[in-house]
Image: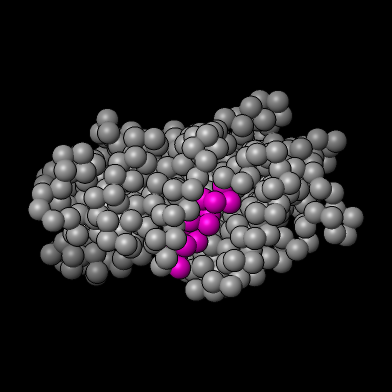
Amino acid sequence: MDELPIGRRVAYWRNRRKMSQQVFADRLGKSKSWVDKVERGVRRLDKFSVVYEIADVLQLDVQILLGRDPERRPDSVNCVDQIEVEEIRAALERYDQISAFFYAPPEPPPLPEMRKAVTHAWLSYQHAKYGMLARTLPRLLREAQAADTAYSDSGQGQESAHLLGQVYQIASSALRKLGEHELSWLAADRSIAVSQRAGDQLLAGTATARVACALLSLGRARPALEINVNIANRLAPGTSGNDNSPERLSVYGQLLLQGAMAAARIGDSATVRDLLAGADEAARCMDGDANYYWTCFGPTNVKLHRAAAAVELGEGRVAVEVHQSLDPEGFNALLPERRAHHYLDQARAQALIGDIDMASEMLLEGDRLAPSEIRCRPLAREVLSDVLRRTRGTPSAPVAELAEHMSVGV
């Protein structure tokens, strides 16, 4: 889109923001005719002050309007720009398989290279390197789609579908963290369809958990609960000939944990207890926490979800008590995203019980561990805003600095 005239870029982003020319003109204090002439290139935008005003109305980095890469502050390098989200959206909107019905598919990347790239993307996500991940996801999506299309009729078809299913799950998880819930749902839904072609029930199980997470983020807690429990029952170890492998235990446990979070969102504490008990039983069959199918499932992660569910139920003190009972060695062995996410949950728990100083400390602890998990998430901004509003007097220097980095008013 960089090669487009600025007027066309204005029209593109106005439409993306679902604004009519009249609404856009009203917000700018201009006439509809003026907007129409700008977008058609009849009227030039030769004043930077006007360009900045347009960018402000469109909630857009002015560099994007000018066809340049957005400027990134050093402290925000790990976050995601709007243009990167749009590039991921464009990659998700591709339909290579139907195109291949009419034309020869593009030359696909070798599958060994794809495996390495997918593993690197998972690790980037689990280390909360969201900015780095966002900049690689569009290309990874395109290459995984091309590989799936090219290899679909060969002996490598299931493996290429498996890799594409994983890439969709990575995209779904990262987009949900960043507040792009509709796109997160789209990517997760794509993963379910691809996973069936991959012939892997456990991959389909993790895809189901991603769909449920996206539904929960969209405020659809009951469907999220139902889909988690339904697929967990189908994958339960020891039933219908299912094995008791750590891989199956991990995926089964992940579904139960996500089901517990959905039940907590609707205030169903009895179902929360049942699902957490089932996940705990599965975790006890594991040899500690593991990362099969990138689930990070095990006894420690069950406790983290127990604390998170308590926060959703408004039981802040219970969440704090769970945190205090954690085995430090097991907790420190978890990957950064999981631990920083837990600190964010603990900040919410401490705020619930009125300990604003400790809530601040939990946010700072999460920021020290994985800055992107705190600085890039809309939820963290909400928590920090609440903490600042309830802080008596001037916030501490570290909290004020964090607020400045996150552009949250002190």
Q: Nearer the viewer, residue 162 or 336?
A: 336
Q: Nearer the viewer, residue 327 or 119?
A: 327
The part of the image, by quadrant, that contains residue 316 is bottom left
Colouring of the image: one colour
Image-based side of 367 in relation to 246, left or right: left
Task: Find out whether residue 302 is within the magenta segment.
Answer: yes
The part of the image, by quadrant, that contains residue 114 is top right
Is there any visible trace of residue 138 in the rendered image?
Answer: no
Q: Please identify the dominant SS of the magenta region.
A: helix
Residue 198 point in image, percent of width and height: 77, 46
Is there any visible trace of residue 298 in the rendered image?
Answer: yes
Q: Nearer the viewer, residue 347 or 232?
A: 347
The quarter of the image holding the N terminus is top left
Image-based side of 397 in relation to 245, left or right: left
Residue drawn at point x = 53 percent, y = 54 percent:
305
Image-based side of 217 in relation to 71, left or right: right
Residue 82 point in image, percent of width and height: 36, 46
Residue drawn at point x = 73 percent, y = 38 percent:
160
Residue 308 point in image, percent of width and height: 47, 57
Q: Which residues are magenta?
A: 301-313
**How many callouts does the rendering have?**
0
Q: Please, is residue 292 above or below residue 107 in the view?
A: below
Residue drawn at point x = 45 percent, y = 49 percent:
323
Image-based side of 41 in relation to 319, left or right: left
Task: Find out whether residue 184 is within the magenta segment.
Answer: no
Q: Nearer the viewer, residue 226 or 154?
A: 226
Residue 282 point in image, percent of width and height: 71, 52
Residue drawn at point x = 79 percent, y = 40 percent:
157
